[in-house]
Amino acid sequence: MRTFLVLALLAMISGSHTLPTVVQWEEDPEQTPGFFEGDIVLRPKSRNCMSNPSQHWPDGIVYYKFSEGIDDVRKDFIRNAMNIVEEGSCVHFKEADDDQPYFVNITGNPGGCYSTVGFVEDISILNLHKHDLNTGCYRTGKIIHELLHTLGFYHMQSTYDRDDYIRIAYENVKPDFVHDFAKYSKDFVEDFGEKYDYGSIMHYSPHAFSANGAETIVPLQEIREGLMGQREALSTVDLIKLNKMYKCPELQVKD
Ligand SMILES: [Zn+2]
């Protein structure tokens, strides 16, 4: 049943992107071959924008279910990441009961870490390959990254004005992965008045999808080493956007 469900949802991926026939991960489990931008499961209705309020979880409550096979230690690890998101916002994660019609199904299938973007009145996917704790998909920052996709965030470097801040070095990108550097129009994404954030937990690393080890994303400003692509913590701007997206009554962001 679980396999069927995942396949059914994957079958809905936009036709311009090939299905993940070979499910595997290389050095970075967010960069799963066959997935849009490496870790996004596309659905036609959800690809437009994170600014559309209908794609935000009602009342800021994300219902979730753990699929079979995720052990208690991993459940606690995931819940800890959820708690971090909750502490910085008014969003809540609640385990779904049997009657809950929509929820995110947290799976542990092989093939990297990936998720659907935003809310639909249906079953969303968040998959975390069952790596050992603090490795691969089971790093707190990686899980937070995937949770932000679930909440409605796209990748930072996909935003409409990214070319003012970074250069995509296409000459270094693996040819089959050029589409992973898609850019959205202003109608597609909402920046909530916040400026480009090199330190977002939703930003790719400088070597994402590199064919030759050279940088694929070159910042146009001088930035701190290790800032771009960090998966350590939500940035201040990430938190501000999350609070604005979910209309949190009080901005829960501490500098
Ligand atoms: Zn991602």
Image: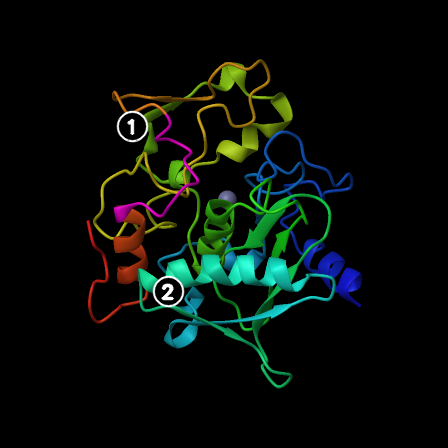
How many C-alpha atoms fall within 10 Å of the one at disc 2: few (<14), some, or many (≥20)? Answer: some
Residue visible at 62% across and 86% down in the picture: 99
**Looking at the picture, does residue 165 appear above or below residue 74?**
above
Q: Are marks 1 and 2 in contact (CB under 8 Å)?
A: no
Q: Is residue 29 above or below residue 102?
A: above
- Residue 235 part of the magenta segment: yes
Q: Residue at x 32, y 66 (%)?
A: 246
Task: In the rendered structure, find residue 165 and report the number of the disc placed on it.
Answer: 1
Q: Which residue is located at x 51 percent, y 63 percent?
A: 79
Front of the two marks 1 and 2: 2
Range covered by the magenta-colored residues: 226-236
Amino acid under disc 1: Tyr
Q: Is residue 71 left or right of residue 158?
A: right
In space, the residues marked 1 and 2 are separated at their CA atoms by 30 Å
Label number found at residue 47? none
Relative to 184, 237 lies left or right: left
Q: Position of residue 182 (x, y in %)?
A: 48, 35
**Image quadrant assignment for residue 165:** top left
Q: Is residue 202 magenta?
A: no
Q: Taking 233 as reference, is 19 left or right?
A: right
**Can see residue 128?**
yes
Q: Position of residue 81 (x, y in %)?
A: 46, 57
Q: Which residue is mark 2?
A: 86
How busy is the neighbourhood of tag 1: few (under 14 within 10 Å), some, or many (20 plus)? some
Query: For the residue marked with disc 2, what is the amino acid?
Result: Glu
Q: Quadrant of the N terminus?
A: bottom right
Q: Which element is circle 2 on?
A: helix
Q: Which residue ends up furthest to the front in the rendered image?
A: 73
Indicate the secondary structure of the residue bearing disc 1: loop
Q: 185 and 30: which one is in front?
A: 30
Magenta: predominant secondary structure element? loop
